[in-house]
Image: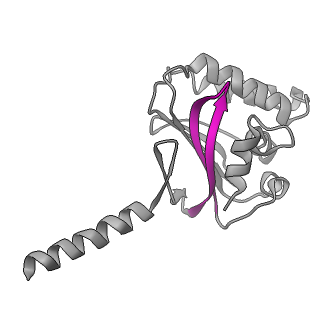
Amino acid sequence: MIKKLFIGVLAVLLMNSMAEAREVSGKNIPESMTAGDNALILNGAGTRTKMWMSIYAAGLYLPEKMQNAQEIISADIPMAIKIHVISGFMSAEKMENALRDGFEKSTNGNLTPLKDRIEKFILAQKAELNKDDILEYVYIPGQGVSVFSKGKLTTTVEGNDFKKAVFGIWLCDDPCDEDLKEGLLNN
């Protein structure tokens, strides 16, 4: 009797723990996270692919679910993008190139007002990226976008205008990956 009860309780606990993450391309994307004192929920998740190769899985976190990309980009609310590197072909140099391309698209080529902050943001991610590494871009109003690489805070870049450019990489009209954008908005 006790053994059956134990097995039943264990099964319920396992099901609950599995429900706390969404699997995307073999990576567990948590259903929630915190940004400072703010509780965020997973808005959506997807995979960045390039030439049919999965590069990373990503999740978008917001205080509440939203589907309008422009509203998310414009909102001055806490939010985060969590990236799980899938491919061993991803490197810091390739990520830098992708970010630069993303900023170009996100700002419609108007990089001048953000130039120094973009360089600070990219410099904070110069450490080599490996398969299974995690990057987080966490925005808190009044503070800026904090970059966490491999679980460590590397910098915070100020400005809501900069936050719009960062989140625009994935959510603008010409995002880095249309399917990933759709996944991030699919709640």
Q: How is the image coloured?
A: one colour
Residue 160 locus on image (x, y percent): 78, 48
Q: Which residue appears at 78% of the width and 25% of the height? A: 101
On the question of residue 142 being in view, the answer is no
- The single residue placed furthest to the bottom in the displayed view is 1
Q: Considering the image in quadrants, where does the N terminus appear?
A: bottom left
On the question of residue 107 being in view, the answer is yes
Relative height, residue 24 to residue 134 (above, below): below
Residue 136 locus on image (x, y percent): 56, 42
Quarter where residue 41 is shown: bottom right
Relative height, residue 48 to residue 119 (above, below): below
Q: Is residue 38 left or right of residue 141?
A: left
Q: Which residue appears at 61% of the width and 50% of the height? A: 45
Residue 164: within the magenta? no
Q: Is residue 113 left or right of residue 126?
A: right
Relative height, residue 72 to residue 167 (above, below): below
Query: What is the chief secondary structure element of the magenta stretch?
Result: strand
Residue 60: within the magenta? yes
Quarter where residue 18 is shown: bottom left
Q: Which residue appears at 27% of the width and 69% of the height? A: 11
Q: Considering the image in quadrants, where does the C terminus appear?
A: bottom right
**Number of on-image labels:** 0
Q: Is residue 108 left or right of residue 122?
A: right
Quarter where residue 113 is shown: top right
Q: Range of the magenta residues?
A: 39-62
